Image (tube, helix red, strand yellow):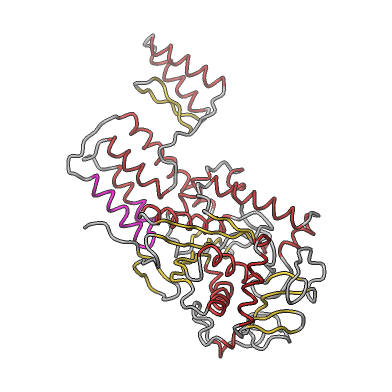
Amino acid sequence: MGLQGLRLYNTLTQKKEEFKPINPPRVGMYACGPTVYNYAHIGNLRTYIFNDILRRTLLKNGYKLTHVMNITDVGHLTSDADTGEDKMLVSARKEKKSVWDIADFYTKAFFRDTALLNIQKPDIVCKATEHINDMIEMNKKIERNGYAYFKGGNLYFDTGKLKDYGKLARLKLENLREGARTDKDPNKKNPTDFVLWFTKSKFQDQEMKWPSPWGVGYPGWHIECSAMSSKYLGEQFDIHTGGIDHIPVHHTNEIAQAEAAFQKKPWVRYWIHAEFLVMDKGKMAKSSGEFITLQTLIDKGFNTLAYRYLCLGTHYRKQLMFSWEAMRTAASAYKALKNRIMELKDENTTFDKSNKKEYYKTEFMNRVNDNLNMPRALALLNNMLRDDSLGSKEKIELINDFDEILGLDLLKEEKIEVSEDVKELVERREQARKKKDFKLADKLREEIKAKGFILEDTSAGPKLKKL
């Protein structure tokens, strides 16, 4: 079997499809970014690992990718609809800081976390607060085209004007009752209508405000992504990603706004969504106040890439069941994988008895191209490592190739901090070996092990590995 093309599950059509970009080899991809009012939790970060795998896969397939991600630093209310307060404002009050300071602090924290997970930075990172004029211009287009109305101090999108509103989530509009999705708003013509622009008529203490044709105020959350994605990727583009929680409201409203503004369908060709990370009590959420950050894992002694490894072990369209036992198992498996690969470096053999190298290279990409099937790709990696028909050099070449997508630093040796007393034990053991005092050498090896290290004798001398 030869190399297969990329196939992706499209939420819009609810089926796996061959990926065909609008203007090959160029691909435009927009990923819903973080609302920077708190640290990202590991459930959030699972979605960005999925985005990263998709990004790496597109690049590996030879596409010329423009990857755009937003930073929501204004306008995201505590409900995904139009209710509650701005999440940024709530966090600012809680921490006694300005909303601008909150946004700056948690944006930096987010990118610190993604770097620790080997998540490549998007080509364009756009902040909502830096694109207010783009949102105003898009709202003006929507209004000119007859899809908006101004009432009670706010500009609303009229979902009743779109016959196919809700197509992404397969919403049955006739079954939606007032209050089913949002608190009752007497200004709305339809229960699914949503705000494009808030004025000072709501949330008087809102710090972030801008002048607009509808009054001084701030944008609705949904318009941010529609305006910014289209600014950088055009009025129609290839891929939009996010978590499954974005499907019924946020992404549904993004589509409505963009297609009303540009009068083109489909606005986005492929909608790709990642499932939740779940614990015993359900999906992890910041609103509960109980969530695990990447720093939590670090504080418990876990390698951050062991978490990436855990995520790759479950397909992005399936819920990832997180537990500390699962995390420990993943960390152990990741460490064993790295140790096996480090051993290959010392073997220094080269042969390909069955011409398997090209098979593995092609089969790995076929598994990845099958809707990013990372569990099967990892299984192939382990099969390849056990294949005696390949020499160590061939295996290392394949590992290097696979890791362009896996992003697990499989060939990178970890720096091990060794205390002076352990170094002294290693030196004493070397002297015992040279004197052929193997009883003492074995005793010293056990002492080294008790301090958390495995000592291996190699042609290049003694080598320490962390337990």
Residue visible at 42% across and 17% down? 441
Q: Is residue 184 magenta?
A: no
Foreground: 38 or 270? Answer: 270
Foreground: 458 or 168? Answer: 168
On the rendered structure, is 435 left or right of 349? right
Which x, y percent locates residue 26?
A: 41, 60
On the rendered structure, is 423 left or right of 2? right
Residue visible at 55% across and 87% down? 173
Q: Is residue 365 magenta?
A: yes
Instruction: Locate residue 181: give its quadrant.
Output: bottom right
Residue range in magenta is 357-379
Which residue extends farthest bottom? 174
7 lies above or below 293: below
Q: Main secondary structure of the magenta part?
A: helix
Which x, y percent locates residue 316?
A: 45, 61
Residue visible at 50% across and 18% down? 425
